[in-house]
Amino acid sequence: MKLPVVPHAHSQEHAHDHDHGHHRHAHASNVPAITLEGDAEAHRAPFANRAGSGKMLFLDAFSGIAGDMTIAALVDLGVPFRVVQQSVAALGITGFELQLQRARGGAIGGTKFDVLVATAQPDRRYRAIDDLLAASSLNPGVKALARRIFLRLGEAEAEVHRSSLDEVAFHEVGAVDALVDIVGAAACFDFLGAEVVSSPLPMGRGSVLCQHGALPLPAPATVACLRGVPTVDAGIEAELVTPTGAAIVASVTREFVAWPALAPERVGWGFGTRGLPDRLNALRVVLGSVASRAEALPAATHVVLEVNVDDMSGELAAHALSSLLESGALDAWATPIVMKKGRPALTISVIAESGAQHRLAEVLLRETHSIGVRHTLVSRTERPRRVAIVPTEYGVIPLKISEGPYGPPRIKPEFDACASAARSAGVPVGVVIAAALSAYAR
C-alpha cells in the first residue's frame, strides 16, 4: 500500500519513509515490480528469544536500507511480529496502525511492512522523543539501542541544519514513522541477539523533494549518519539509503564486508515499495553460524613494526617515537625488556595502516640503532569515530567521540586544546575538560 507523501521539516526523509526514494525513472523490463499478496502469515517456525546468540546476522543491503525494510526482513527471517507490536505499544502513542503483508518481487517471496497513519500527529522534537523513550516501558536493551539510534539521527539533523540537538524537530508523519521504525528495528535486533555485520551501503544520486525544496542524494542527514561507514556508488538516480536506515545500520553493525565468512541458516527478505531501474528493491538478511573465530577474522588491514634496542638513551627513544607519529603512525610506544646477558633494553613498536609499513620501517632504521625491523600483519576492530566542536567559556574545544554497537559512546575532549585554553584562562586543565563535556551534554 502506498500512502501520499506529506512533506515535513528537519528530516530529509520523505514523510512516508517506506517508499524508499523520491526518484523518477522508467522501470527496466527485467527488474520485477513488488506485488502485495495480503496479510503476512508465518511461513516458518518463529524464533525464540535470543535465538541468534552466538550467531552472525548479515545485512545484505544490495539495494540500500530503510527502517521499514529492516523490520520487514527481520520478521520475514523469523522474529515474531508481536515483538514489534508490543515494543511500539510500549511508547503509548496512537493514531496509526502497523501493517504486515506478504510480498513478492518476481519469483522471490518476502514481507512488506507499513505504518498506516490514521490521525494527525504532533510535531516532536528530539528531546521530547528521547524523554518518551526513556520513560517508556520498553525493556532496557531495546530502550538503550533505540535511544542510541535516535541520538545518531538527531545529531546528524543538527549538523545538517547547523542547530543544537534540542532544536531538531521531526514533524507530523515523519516523527511517528521514525519512532516506529527505530523502536521496531531495535526490538528485533535485541530479540534476536546476533552479532550484526553489513555489506557496504550503495548510494544513489539525484535529488529528493521535501519541505525544504530539492536536496541532493544521498540526503544530507543520511551522509551525516554514515560517518565511518563504507559506501559505494550505486550508479543510479534513486534514494537507496534513508536517514533512518542509515542511523540504524550505523548503530548496530560491528563490521562492514562484502560477504562474511558464515554458514547460512535462515534468510529473510524485506521489500520496499518503489521500483528500481536495475535491481530488486529489497533488503536480504542472512542468519548463520561462524565455524570458528579464527576463520571469521577479517583480512589484515594494519601492520605492527618492532625493533629491540639496548643502546639508546631515553631522549633518543622519545625522539624516535615522535618521528614515527609525525610520519603517519597510528600509535607508537616503547616497552622495557631484558635482552641477552641481562642487558636492559627497549622494544620500540608502531602500528600503522599496511600501506605505510615501508615508510615507517625506514624511520625505525634511521632513528634507532637497530639493524632489523619485524613486520607483523594484523587486523583490528574499530569504533566509528568522529569529532564534535563545542563552544565553552574558555573557547572552542574539539571532542573525539567513539560510537558503534559497543555500549555508550565514549567522549574525550582534545587534551592539547584543553591545556592551551587552560593556560590562557589561568585555570586547571580539568576545569576546561569538565566545561567541554558539559557543553557537549547540553
Image (cartoon, grey):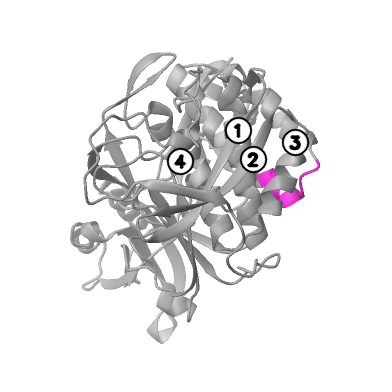
Mark 2 lies on residue? 98
Above or below for 364 versus 122: below
Mark 4 or mark 1, earlier in chain: 1
Could you classify mark 4 by the number of other residues whose Cα lies within 10 Å: few (under 14), some (14-19), or many (20 or more)? many
Lateral position of residue 106 relative to residue 143, left or right:
left
Label 1 sits on a secondary structure element that is strand
Q: Is residue 17 visible?
A: yes
Mark 4 or mark 2, earlier in chain: 2
Lateral position of residue 284 relative to residue 123, left or right:
left
Label 2 sits on a secondary structure element that is strand
**Quadrant assignment, res 167:** top right
Mark 3 lies on residue? 91
Foreground residue among 417 and 400: 400
Q: Quadrant of the C terminus?
A: top right
Residue 369 shown in magenta: no
Foreground residue among 398 and 112: 112
